[in-house]
Image (tube, rainbow, N blue to C red):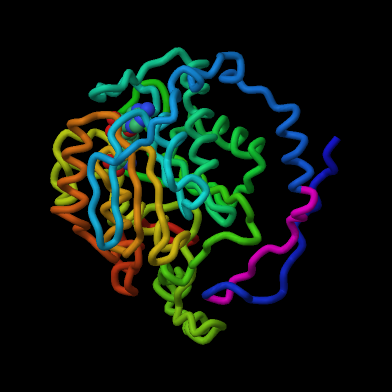
């Protein structure tokens, strides 16, 4: 039996930008112990289905990207990511994986049936997750964008693979589809896990934003705290704001063909905070190519996979031709943050 986790102890060193504290109480040893137990005991529905990998990944034939560009090195493979990841020459050297997989929601993708029986879909999910984790360098980390009905399974699977959860972020978007029988869906989960939490990329300073204390209350103390933070702090783990909506038809980032394009600002926050210039970023599900587009703009090398020829051609045109449209949007200026607060009225504002 795993030992019960110790409760969090207060850290009295203001070691985060903005004068915030990093909680120090989570006992890493106990966490590792938990993960060993999980690996042995947790069974998920997808485990009941045999993996198609032995049939899919055959032969010693090497693989080659269909598209490749330099400065920084960028490549796009066309095919099933499970076959590609299994043979990727860069296996073990990837610094960061970002994956936004199909959700099994009957989206009419070209070349992919997005409506499998649940057990098969889970099997597919665990297979590509395993392959992606195997591509990571020892300090590497993985982000997965998933909806409510898959988040728990992805978390449990990554935990039983003995990765450590760094953050469970939520992307809150507006313009969800109306519903008659329950609340409107307005979020997806941005799950960040690291192979080694003590030795992983983290650069919070690259994505600072103004504190509510400075933008809402004009409290000057926040400008004088540690780190010369000037009223800035790392973002919360719930992501929303003026540029964080879904990419609708009026947005200049919008690419025709692609139904599930993520906003550049999302990938910019992920890439800036959890990779370094020159690092290698891998996206198994390119779609419109958002990850490589943003990675290129910020001088990261990248590899993407896409099963559809048509989507891959369009993604490549974007990655190498159109480029990033709104570079720098994940870093709100003081004035932008003030405007955002007026728009969204969040935080503990007394509105009487
Ligand atoms: C949710 S979309 C990704 C959207 C992307 N994040 C963007 O911002 O445009 C998922 C993509 O994965 C592709 N896909 C589905 N199954 C795949 C597989 N087994 N291997 C590679 N690509 C796959 C689909 O064709 C689709 O373009």
Number of labels in the image equals 0
Q: Residue at x 49, y 22 (%)?
A: 53
Quadrant for the N terminus, please. top right
Residue 325 pos. (x, y %) = 19, 58
Ligand 1, by image quadrant, is top left
Quadrant of the rendered image containing residue 269: bottom left
Residue 341 pos. (x, y %) = 36, 62
Is residue 103 shown left or right of residue 32? left
Which residues are drawn in magenta? 18-30
> Taking the image as drawn, is residue 232 in sight?
yes
Q: Residue at x 13, y 46 (%)?
A: 250
Quadrant of the rendered image containing residue 107: top left
Q: Nearer the viewer, residue 216 or 291?
A: 291
Is residue 348 shown left or right of residue 251? right
Residue 217 pos. (x, y %) = 44, 74
User: Residue 20: within the magenta?
Assistant: yes
């Amino acid at each position: 039996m795993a030992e019960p986790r110790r409760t969090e102890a207060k850290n009295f060193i203001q070691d985060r930008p903005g004068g915030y504290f990093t909680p120090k109480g989570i006992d890493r040893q106990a966490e590792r112990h938990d993960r060993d137990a999980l690996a042995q005991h947790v069974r998920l529905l997808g485990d009941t289905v045999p993996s198609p990998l032995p049939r899919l990944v055959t032969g010693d034939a090497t693989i080659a990207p269909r598209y490749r560009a330099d400065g920084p090195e960028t490549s796009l493979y066309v095919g099933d990511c499970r076959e590609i990841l299994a043979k990727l020459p860069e296996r073990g050297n990837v610094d960061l994986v970002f994956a936004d997989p199909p959700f099994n929601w009957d989206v009419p993708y070209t070349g992919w049936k997005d409506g499998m029986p649940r057990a098969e879909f889970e099997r597919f999910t665990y297979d590509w997750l395993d392959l992606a984790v195997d591509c990571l360098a020892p300090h590497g980390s993985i982000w997965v964008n998933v909806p409510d009905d898959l988040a728990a399974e992805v978390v449990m699977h990554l935990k039983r693979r003995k990765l450590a959860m760094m953050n469970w972020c939520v992307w809150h978007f507006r313009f969800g589809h109306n519903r008659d029988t329950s609340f409107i869906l307005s979020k997806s989960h941005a799950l960040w896990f690291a192979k080694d939490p003590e030795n992983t990329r983290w650069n919070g300073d690259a994505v600072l934003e103004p504190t509510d204390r400075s933008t809402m209350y004009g409290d000057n103390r926040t400008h004088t705290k540690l780190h010369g933070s000037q009223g800035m702090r790392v973002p919360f783990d719930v992501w929303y704001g003026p540029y964080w909506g879904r990419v609708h038809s009026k947005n200049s980032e919008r690419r025709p063909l692609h139904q599930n394009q993520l906003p550049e600002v999302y990938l910019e926050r992920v890439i800036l905070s959890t990779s370094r210039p020159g690092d290698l970023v891998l996206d198994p599900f390119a779609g419109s190519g958002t990850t490589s587009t943003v990675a290129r703009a910020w001088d990261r090398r990248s590899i993407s996979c896409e099963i559809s020829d048509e989507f891959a051609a369009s993604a490549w045109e974007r990655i190498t031709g159109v480029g990033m449209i709104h570079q720098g949007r994940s870093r709100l200026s003081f004035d932008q943050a003030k405007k955002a607060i007026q728009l969204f009225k969040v935080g503990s504002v007394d509105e009487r």
